[in-house]
Image (spheres, helix red, strand yellow):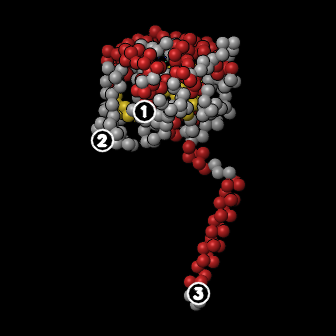
Amino acid sequence: MISSTRQIASAAFGTTQRRWIASTSRSSRAMPFIPDHTSASPSSLSMKSEPMRLLMLAKPGSGKGTLSGRLTSKYNVQFVSTGDMLREEIKAGTEVGKQAEGIVAGGGLVPDELMIKLLGTSLESSSMKGKSWILDGFPRTLVQGERLDRYLGSTGQPLGLIVHLDVPDEIIMGRISDRWIHPSSGRIYNNSYNRPKVEGLDDVTGEPLVRRADDNPEIFARRLKSFYAQTAPLLEYYRSTAPSNLVTLSGKTSDEIWPQLESLVRSRFGSLKSKSETKRVVPEAVIRRAEREISRDHRDFISSMVPIIPAAY
Ligand code: ADP
């Protein structure tokens, strides 16, 4: 039995936040999240005051997880990764996990209907509705993209931004051969440019790092092929349905792309607040109550001291 709300740490570095949220992952609980009668209505408007609903669309290994981790460490944003969800399902040995295991291991794509059900429960959870979120790994096919648009359109919360990360294939291939992950948090390391402080161990927890089973050159080549055959057509889809929402960011490393991504989301979503900014916003009433409590405590302290203060003082 697995819990209905599972969370996986989001940050690729520095924090122990949870990575995907409120995903009711038992297949028996999964609900179709796209009513058939709704019609597609992807918005092409910039939604500055809206929560950030961001899709990361990129080749495998191009840094989606790392960059999403940076956003979730710094901003109040939920993160959903269908790859992480599937790995959890597989680890937990659920029905979905059993169906997906061989496909994921072989570098293929899990059938659309299964993915739609799996993701549906996350998107319908209260921790996602009305919040800022990043979706990584979904959609991966045109069918998934259309269903997602229809569903989000029907809830009046369409995608606000589609970020396409453009990283050269040869760079990605080099990275993958040296990629290590911390399974429970999703933190990603690379022995060439993002080494853990202690080799083989996660910087935050000290737990062992592992290699993803599908991160070997042969399987990776298949994943790349799936991207070109099935996912790349989504770029054309978004180009025609929501041209102003599709933005391509290019670079060789996540460090190169990060400043572009951060300034893009900040300029696009005025409502996006960094965690430190959020902390500073304390309601007036709370401040006044705290002041009252402090002065009461102060009075109590002084009166408790009076009997023991020598008369001369
Ligand atoms: P990457 O982007 O590096 O390929 P992910 O962690 O996103 O890795 O996904 C791992 C695997 O999970 C994919 O290779 C695929 O088999 C499966 N998968 C994830 N998301 C989907 C999806 N939306 N549709 C079909 N299969 C998926």
Tell me the kind of residue under disc 1: Gly
- Please give the name of the residue rendered at 52% of the width and 36% of the height, measured from the top-left corner: 72
The Cα atoms of the two marked residues, 2 and 3, are separated by 58 Å
Residue 300 appears at what percent x and percent y? 63, 73
Please say if the residues under marks 2 and 1 sit with CB atoms less than 8 Å apart: no
Residue 310 appears at what percent x and percent y? 56, 87
Between disc 2 and disc 1, the foreground one is 1
Q: Quick check: 153 above or below 192?
A: above
Label 3 neighbour load within 10 Å: few <14, some 14-19, many 20+: few
Q: Which numbered disc, 2 or 1, marks the residue that appears first in the sequence?
A: 1
Q: Quick check: 290 above or below 15?
A: below
Q: What is the number of the mark on residue 198?
A: 2
- Please give the name of the residue rendered at 39% of the width and 15% of the height, measured from the top-left corner: 102
Position of 52 with respect to 210 (left or right) is right
Residue 160 visible in the current orientation: yes
Ligand 1 neighbours mark 1 (CB distance < 8 Å): no
Q: Which numbered disc, 3 or 1, marks the residue that appears first in the sequence?
A: 1
Instruction: Determine which residue is flagged by label 1.
Output: 186
Tell me the kind of residue under disc 3: Tyr
Instruction: Determine which residue is flagged by label 3.
Output: 313
Position of 257 with respect to 126 (left or right) is left
Ligand 1 quadrant assignment? top left
Q: Which numbered disc, 2 or 3, marks the residue that appears first in the sequence?
A: 2
Disc 2 is placed on an element classified as loop
